[in-house]
Amino acid sequence: MCYPINTAERNYWELATERIQESGAKVRPDSVRGVEVLLTASPEAFKRQADGTPHDWHGSKWAEANIAFLKDKFGEQNVVSCTLHQDELTPHFHAVVVPLTADGRLSAKDVFNPKTLRALQTDYAEAMKPFGMERGVEHSRAKHEVMRHVYGAQEQSRGELATLTRPEPATRLSIEGPSGLDLVNLSKWRAEQEARLNAELARQLTSANERASKAASIAQDSAGAKDREKTLARQLASVEGTKTKQIQVRKDVEGGFTRALVQVVQGETLPANVLEYAHQVRAGIKAEAEKHIQQALKAPIRQVSDLTDQLKKLPGYIYQEDATTKQRELCHTATGSRFELAELKPGGVSVKEAYDQAVQRTVQRDQEQSKGQSRGGGISMK
């Protein structure tokens, strides 16, 4: 979702063009109209809940501080879009900034260059201090210590040290819920899940230990290397803790499914908590489907078949249409959740309304490109 800028999910090119026109800045054929800015931190900075699941950072003080930082550094009107992503290991913001200078010129090289980027990193670290976040090790005194100790060493060793001492984000461990076939043989499912978890943990432990050992042998005197070795040790402890929590979750899930299956066989009503969990799962998949449709509608849409083609490409879903009733639905392959298009609301509106808006955007875009070509030397964004 956009947060809280560009809530209408408008096209970035259109928003950047409008802002440039408002500013009265001159535009050259090679001008950069928008620059993507990424705001994030290391995975360790984002603490998880007691059960190992991630927090929702929407509306948090951290999110508000990121928005305030963008507006302060680039000007509120120049930040045309800002989106918080939480579908990966580390929460992060993607922002689109129009590179307008203080004196009203459109110049990406003046707004974003080595000097300004270093200053931005320093200022961002300062803004994130209240949340316990610090500037990256590669920009700290530790780096200078590493360089001083390895100065004069072979170039290969220096490059290897930089690679080995860079902390590698741990792969997130998760339990795959049993499918309908798995429910027939829960013991086999349990064994497969445990083997998968143990294999991934062993891979991470082996990789981290090898990296730490090699790093220590190359730069034993390096303060930076020692700091990074400590970071690797913390990551190993975090992985082990995550595994323990996931195993307990797996046992709880297995027990719950077993009891539910027995109750179904005996003709009993499923417990309220099981039904509530099923509703929560379906609601989560529905929200995910709506986001996928919203993203698909950003493609050029001129007719219904264009939308249909996009829906057929959605990963993890099957698009179906009843030849008799013309009823169209999406089926989530992993959980079997089914949704009629009429019940989905991408961007908070019905699919029909979202489709009409997409068609209108495409028509406007086609008209603008046509005008640019008729004048000669028009600019188009790929």
Image (cartoon, grey):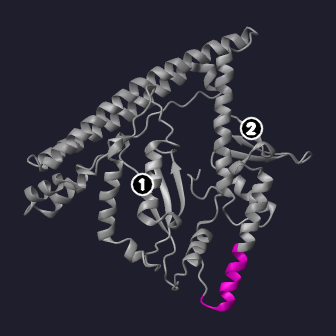
Whichever of callouts 2 and 1 sits on the residue coming sooner in the sequence is 1
Judging by the rendered image, the residue that carries numbered circle 2 is 338
User: Would you say residue 44 sits in the magenta stretch?
Assistant: no
Name the dominant secondary structure of the magenta segment: helix
Q: Residues within 10 Å of mark 1 (few under 14, many from 20)?
A: some
Q: Nearer the viewer, mark 2 or mark 1?
A: 1
Q: Which mark is residue 39?
A: 1
Q: Residue at x 38, y 76 (%)?
A: 110
Figure label count: 2
- The three-letter amino acid code for the residue at tag 1 is Leu
Query: What span is colored magenta in the figure?
Result: 365-377
Secondary structure of the residue carrying tag 2 is strand
Outermost right residue: 324
Q: Quadrant of the C terminus?
A: bottom right
As measured in the structure, the alpha-carbon distance from the residue carrying label 2 to the one carrying label 1 is: 36 Å
- Residue 335 location in percent, x, y? 66, 34
Q: Give the left or right position of residue 15, taking residue 122 as reference.
A: right
Residues marked 2 and 1 touching at CB (< 8 Å): no
- The three-letter amino acid code for the residue at tag 2 is Arg
Q: Could you say which quadrant of the image residue 359 lies in?
A: bottom right
